[in-house]
Amino acid sequence: MGKIISNFFISLDGVVESPDQWHFSYFDEEMGAAIGAGMQIAGAFLMGRKLYEEWSAYWPTTGVDQEFGEFINNIPKYVVSNTLEKAEWNNTTVVSGDVAARLREIKEQTDGAVQMSGSATTVRWLLANGLLDELNLLVHPIAVGHGRRLFEDTPTYPLKLVKSETLKSGVLNLSYVPNVD
């Protein structure tokens, strides 16, 4: 059975919104290797409607020589949405209706991990429904001060740290799993 693994660039104050405005000065070979390791185990990619709309407008038109562009354009993609009726981006399926049941099926059918990124709302929903298996955070040494945070007005979710690494840039590479003792 596959796993759903969520990945985020996150600031010290918990902001995940608009990483394009604060993340890139920390991106280096070490971080690229950490992201690449996640791509290597991915069998599918999960996203919310908003990220789908942003990425489907950008990635299909970029050159395939970009490693992430080639990855995201070719991998099976699943979009969680009850408002999106069809997906035009190749290899994309809209997941609606009984989303929890459908995601359990996708986990069972996927070789490798179902990776996801970009939607704090989706991650909170996955946690609330017992569907998130791992949460990977690249914690940047910056306090952004504004923007959407990963956890805002949410229930308490106990997590267990299973991996930690400090990158030369000062970014912490942390992996958590739900702590369901």
Image: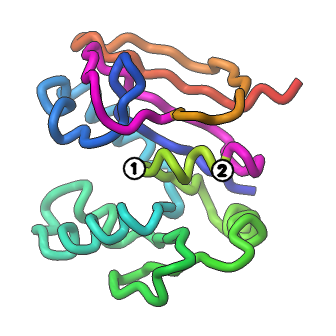
The total number of labels drawn is 2
**Residue located 77% across and 26% down the image:** 179
**Residue located 32% across and 41% down the image:** 17
Left or right of 80 on screen, residue 141: left
Label 1, secondary structure: give it.
Answer: loop
Residue 119 is situated, as x and y percent measured from the top left of the image, at 45, 51
N-term-proximal mark, 2 vs 1? 1
Left or right of 52 on screen, residue 155: right
* Crowd band around label 2 with a 10 angstrom C-alpha radius: few (<14), some (14–19), many (20+): some
Magenta stretch contains residue 147: yes
Farthest-out residue, right: 181
Left or right of 150 on screen, residue 111: right
Q: Quadrant of the N terminus?
A: bottom right
**Residue located 28% across and 13% down the image:** 141
Q: Which of the numbered marks, if any, corresponds to residue 60?
A: none
For the residues labelled 2 and 1, the Cα–Cα distance comes to: 13 Å
Do the residues bearing badges 2 and 1 touch, measured as CB atoms within 8 Å?
Answer: no
Residue type at mark 2 is Leu
Mark 2, residue position: 126
Farthest-out residue, front: 153
Mark 1, residue position: 118
Q: Quadrant of the C terminus?
A: top right
Label 2, secondary structure: give it.
Answer: helix
Residue 128 is situated, as x and y percent measured from the top left of the image, at 72, 46
84 and 147: which is toward the camera: 147
| Boundaries of the magenta span | 127-150
Residue 166 is situated, as x and y percent measured from the top left of the image, at 37, 11
